[in-house]
């Protein structure tokens, strides 16, 4: 029996044995991760491909079931195992807030909301639940957590960042042992750790400084000295590595004009040699194509720059044959030493052996039952209520509006986001840019949560954008207004004005001018609200709560108290940006860490 096939041998021995048997062609194949659309027709077998992935919204069939995913994955695996050495693949997906591309999965709040909970133990449980729902579909690798430190809310990925404060981001890396399992005490620093078939490979991203780009423009340049980079953007990586994170993804962005995907000093010099990271470094989607401007202007140069910088696995969704040809030529002509290739393959194989995929390559149907289970929905609901930040409660502190009474004759619910699961979940949900409406996501809208919570005799009337006549002719006791941003992801969310999209301001002005109102802002970041704050009785930062809107009603009506704290500074106007806690010009409408609390109301009768 070959040593690499013997589970009783140490991982190091198995890795070295397997590498000693591999041709250059087989090694380069391991360094590739390709998109599922381009992976059929025996491609994995022909090119010895190491991994397959789904780009945003890429599914086997629309509204695919867990079984559909597993069937597809097992076909790919058969292909991979039929190669000469039979090296299995793993499959990656953007499960950034739950297994969010998958129909019927539990959608947790986006990271900005989790940052508001200040509850690392909760986030660890969310990691474990996400791992189970990913394994329920047969996949084993998630591109999460994003440990960006968003320093400018104009950035379209700010909701993927737990906080502007590196300490909060470090605390939330507790999601990694949730996803991968707790690192045993005897493990050396930097060794990747994955504990069995209910856990997944995690990925700390995007290395490094993705949240610090000028004006928050996605993929652009982070201008900061080395001390600043280390102080603000690096701490999350130190924590992630100490928790055994298996992979780290490189950022599209640059540091002081140098592209991160070509940054030997930070990838090899610092991450591998100084921090002793032993997992593998993966490129972002077509990341090496963006080393040049315009994209793919010089592919051979880009392959050389990326491989030489120290990237181990390359997300080359479509043009992988060109990558293979370029890298083969570069190695054969001694532009890239074989030792660099061996380093990459050694790291990838180490993760594969660690996850037990050589012994159990095929996805397990017994885990299908975990997709969207009640326990996970309850966990998501708990996360929602802990993430709500109460910014204002009553025109004066003596007369708080919240918690709202459940038993009143008539309530108005208004606003574009009150009855829209797609809007409630934001980007990276089913599709890359998110979805609109209630057809693609299983969950509870805020409107339905309100209806579920109030007294059976209370009338709840929903009108998205009520006119003045409607507001005057009905005798409402109070109104719940839910407005905010429409879903977006990445550069599509870059936004230089950060105003509430229309007709949000008009709905706030009309409704709150006519009656007592609480406004819930559903958004991936703070928005301009200063002009309206005086008019509104109560304001709640709801972030992007995900599928379980019942958590919002839990705190509105006092079944639970508000406890969330701002993970980011709430600016007055965009002219102040960037403005973060500790800055000399700090003058927010609500400061970092702010959040009013309420006490739960005791039920009059026991249930």
Image: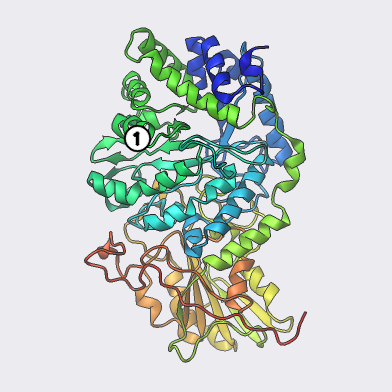
Residue 60 screen position, x and y as percent? 65, 34
The answer to whether one can see residue 108 in this image is yes
- Toward which corner of the image does residue 504 lie, by quadrant? bottom left
Residue 105 left/right relative to 335: right
Point 59% across, 27% down: residue: 353
Q: Position of residue 193 (x, y in %)?
A: 55, 37
Q: Is residue 337 left or right of residue 484?
A: left
Residue drawn at x 66%, y 40% is: 135
Q: Residue at x 49, y 46 (%)?
A: 145
Residue 41: image location, x then y, percent: 62, 18
Question: Which color scheme is applied?
Answer: rainbow
Residue where numbered disc 1 is placed: 274
Q: Nearer the viewer, residue 459 or 473?
A: 459
Residue 323 visible in the current orientation: no
Q: Is 585 above or below relative to 512? A: above
Residue 536, quarter of picture: bottom left
* Residue 517 placement (x, y as % from top left): 51, 81
Q: Residues within 10 Å of mark 1 (few under 14, many from 20)?
A: few
Does residue 387 appear left or right of residue 560 in this picture?
left
């Amino acid at each position: 029996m070959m040593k690499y096939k013997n589970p009783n041998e140490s991982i190091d021995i198995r890795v070295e044995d397997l590498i000693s048997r591999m041709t250059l062609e087989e090694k380069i194949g391991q360094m590739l991760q390709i998109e599922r659309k381009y992976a059929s027709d025996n491609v994995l077998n022909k090119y010895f491909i190491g991994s397959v992935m789904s780009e945003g919204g890429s599914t086997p069939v629309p509204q695919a079931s867990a079984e559909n995913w597993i069937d597809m994955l097992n076909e790919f695996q058969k292909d991979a195992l039929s190669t000469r050495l039979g090296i299995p693949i793993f499959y990656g997906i953007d499960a950034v807030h739950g297994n969010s591309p998958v129909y019927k999965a539990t959608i947790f709040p986006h990271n900005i909301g989790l940052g508001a909970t200040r509850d690392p133990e909760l986030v660890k449980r969310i990691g474990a639940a996400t791992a189970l729902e990913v394994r329920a579909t047969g996949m084993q690798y998630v591109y999460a957590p994003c440990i960006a430190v968003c320093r400018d809310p104009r950035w379209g990925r700010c909701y993927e960042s737990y906080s502007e404060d590196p300490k909060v981001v470090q605390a939330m890396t507790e999601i990694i042992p949730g996803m991968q399992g707790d690192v045993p005490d005897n493990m050396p620093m930097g060794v990747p750790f994955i504990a069995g078939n209910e856990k997944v490979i995690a990925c700390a991203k995007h290395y490094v400084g993705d949240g610090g780009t000028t004006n928050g423009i996605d993929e652009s340049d982070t201008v900061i000295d080395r001390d600043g980079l280390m102080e603000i953007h690096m701490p999350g990586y130190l924590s992630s590595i100490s928790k055994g994170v298996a992979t780290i993804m490189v950022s599209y962005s640059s540091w002081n004009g140098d592209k991160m995907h070509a940054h030997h000093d930070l990838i090899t010099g610092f991450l591998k040699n100084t921090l002793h990271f032993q997992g593998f470094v993966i490129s972002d989607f077509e990341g090496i194509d963006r080393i040049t401007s315009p994209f793919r202007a010089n592919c051979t140069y880009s392959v050389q720059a990326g491989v030489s910088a120290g990237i181990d696995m390359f997300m080359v969704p479509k043009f992988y044959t060109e990558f293979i040809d370029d890298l083969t030529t570069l190695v054969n002509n001694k532009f890239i030493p074989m030792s660099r290739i061996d380093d990459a393959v050694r790291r990838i194989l180490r993760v594969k052996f660690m996850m037990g995929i050589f012994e159990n390559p095929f996805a397990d149907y017994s885990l299908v039952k975990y997709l969207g289970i009640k326990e996970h929905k309850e966990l998501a609901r708990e996360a929602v209520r802990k993430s709500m930040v109460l910014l204002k409660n009553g025109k004066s502190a003596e007369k708080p509006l919240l918690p709202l009474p459940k038993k009143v004759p008539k309530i108005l619910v208004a606003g574009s986001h009150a009855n829209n699961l797609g809007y409630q979940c934001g980007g990276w949900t089913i599709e890359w840019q998110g979805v609109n409406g209630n057809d693609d996501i299983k969950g509870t809208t805020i409107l339905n949560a309100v209806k579920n919570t109030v007294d059976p005799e209370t009338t709840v009337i929903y009108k998205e954008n009520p006119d003045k006549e409607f507001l005057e002719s009905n005798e409402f006791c109070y109104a719940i207004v839910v407005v905010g941003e429409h879903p977006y992801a990445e550069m599509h969310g870059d936004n230089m004005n950060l105003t509430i999209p229309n007709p949000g301001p008009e709905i706030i002005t009309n409704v709150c001018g006519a009656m007592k109102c609480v406004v819930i802002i559903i958004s991936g970041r703070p928005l301009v609200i200063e002009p309206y704050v005086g008019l509104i009785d109560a304001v709640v930062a709801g972030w992007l709560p995900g599928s379980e809107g019942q958590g919002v009603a839990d705190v509105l009506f006092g079944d639970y108290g508000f406890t969330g704290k701002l993970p980011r500074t709430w600016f007055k106007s965009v002219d102040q940006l960037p403005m973060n806690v500790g800055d000399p010009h700090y003058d927010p409408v609500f400061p970092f860490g702010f959040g009013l609390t309420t006490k739960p109301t005791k039920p009059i009768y026991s249930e």
